[in-house]
Image: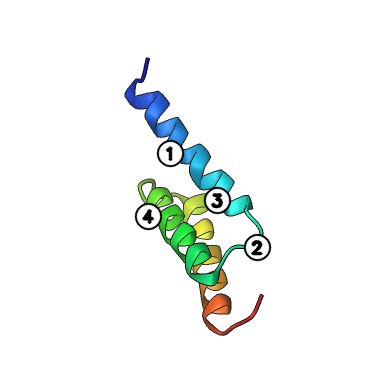
Amino acid sequence: MHTPFTIRAKELMDLYKGLKMKNISTDERLDILLNTKWTVKEWDCNLTREIVDLIDREANMLDRGRP
């Protein structure tokens, strides 16, 4: 049985698994980072602002061709 909570939990688990993945293309990684950024921006607190900052920094490094 699916509830809004279990559906949301699955979405968050998929994001977590995506962030842990190795050997994926830069475009795939950027897509995962962007989805994670949109997800954490739903809540505004210091932790989520730090996460968004880290995501922006990683995306910047990937755009520059850095691993």
* Disc 1 to disc 4, C-alpha distance: 12 Å
Q: Which residue is mark 4?
A: 38
Q: Which residue is mark 2?
A: 23
* Disc 2 to disc 3, C-alpha distance: 11 Å
> Considering only order in the chain, which callout, 4 or 3, is on the residue closer to the N terminus?
3
Pair 1/4: label in front = 1
Q: Residue at x 56, y 45 (%)?
A: 16
Kindly state the secondary structure of the residue where label 3 is placed. helix
Query: Which quadrant is home to the C terminus?
Result: bottom right
Residue 27 horizontal/vertical position (percent): 48, 69
> Considering only order in the chain, which callout, 4 or 1, is on the residue closer to the N terminus?
1
Residue 12 drawn above or below residue 67: above
The answer to whether the residue labelled 4 contacts the one labelled 2, judged by CB atoms less than 8 Å apart, is no
Kindly state the secondary structure of the residue where label 1 is placed. helix
Q: Amino acid at mark 4?
A: Trp
Residue 53 horizontal/vertical position (percent): 51, 65
Pair 2/3: label in front = 2
Residue 3 horizontal/vertical position (percent): 34, 20
Q: In the rendering, which numbered label is found on residue 18?
A: 3
Q: Amino acid at mark 2?
A: Asn
Kindly state the secondary structure of the residue where label 2 is placed. loop
The answer to whether the residue labelled 2 contacts the one labelled 3, judged by CB atoms less than 8 Å apart, is no
- Closer-to-camera residue (15/58): 15
Q: Amino acid at mark 1?
A: Glu
